[in-house]
Image (spheres, rainbow, N blue to C red):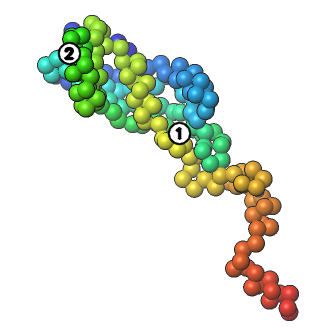
Amino acid sequence: MKIPVDDIPQSPKEIRFSERIEDLNEAFVKGNVRDFRFPPLLDVDLVYYRSGHEVFFQGSLVGELEGCCSRCLESYVFSLDSKFDFVLSPDPPKSNQKVEELSREDLGLSYYSTEEINLAPLIREQVMLALPTRPLCNENCRGLCGGCGANLNHEACACSASVEDPRMAIFRTLKVGR
Ligand SMILES: [Zn+2]
Ligand SMILES: [Zn+2]
């Protein structure tokens, strides 16, 4: 989605659109870790307006993503439903760039430098920020057995049965003694 800067009103304007985010899949494969799979499109609700030279954006992302659980390594589907907001300032003249560079980081501002604001990279950035840092198929996921690699959500493996629980030893002794 691209928005011509001249069309941005002072009173909040609401739009809804679908943004293509499938190239995030490529970005993630390059990183060698495939923690997430992205759908081709994500729904974006966006409210934007200008105040002076600054443009304010507030919105939410809604879509279904696939994650790879960090405990059991199985993929699972989860819905992304996250809110975001950011502000864009006009790109400063070159001479001010150094000084501005500092305040930009301080304020978390980004710039627009063209007649048109291309939302695609900004939306992609928001998607990345909204991802869980440690994907889990379920809060209670039992993960994989460190011994045999069995998925403990689906099966109880032999390793766990043979592990001696010191609290049980007393009962075993009693049985033997009977
Ligand atoms: Zn899991
Ligand atoms: Zn095991």
Residue 26, compared with residue 6, is above or below; it is below
Asked whether mark 2 lies closer than 8 Å to ligand 1, one says: no
Picture disc at residue 78: 1
Report whether 15 appears left or right of 66.
Answer: left
Q: Amino acid at mark 2?
A: Asn
Query: In the current view of this chain or complex, which residue is farthest to the bottom?
Result: 178
Label 2 environment density (alpha carbons within 10 Å; few <14, some 14–19, many ≥20): few
Task: Residue at 23% x, 27% y: name it.
Answer: 103
- Upstream in sequence: badge 1 or badge 2: 1
Give the quarter of the figure containing the C terminus: bottom right
Q: Secondary structure at mark 1?
A: strand
Query: In the current view of this chain or complex, which residue is farthest to the top?
Result: 115
Query: In the current view of this chain or complex, which residue is farthest to the left?
Result: 52
Q: Secondary structure at mark 2?
A: helix
Foreground pick, 128 / 139: 128
Label 1 environment density (alpha carbons within 10 Å; few <14, some 14–19, many ≥20): some
Task: Residue at 75% x, 50% y: name it.
Answer: 149
Picture disc at residue 128: none
Q: Amino acid at mark 1?
A: Phe
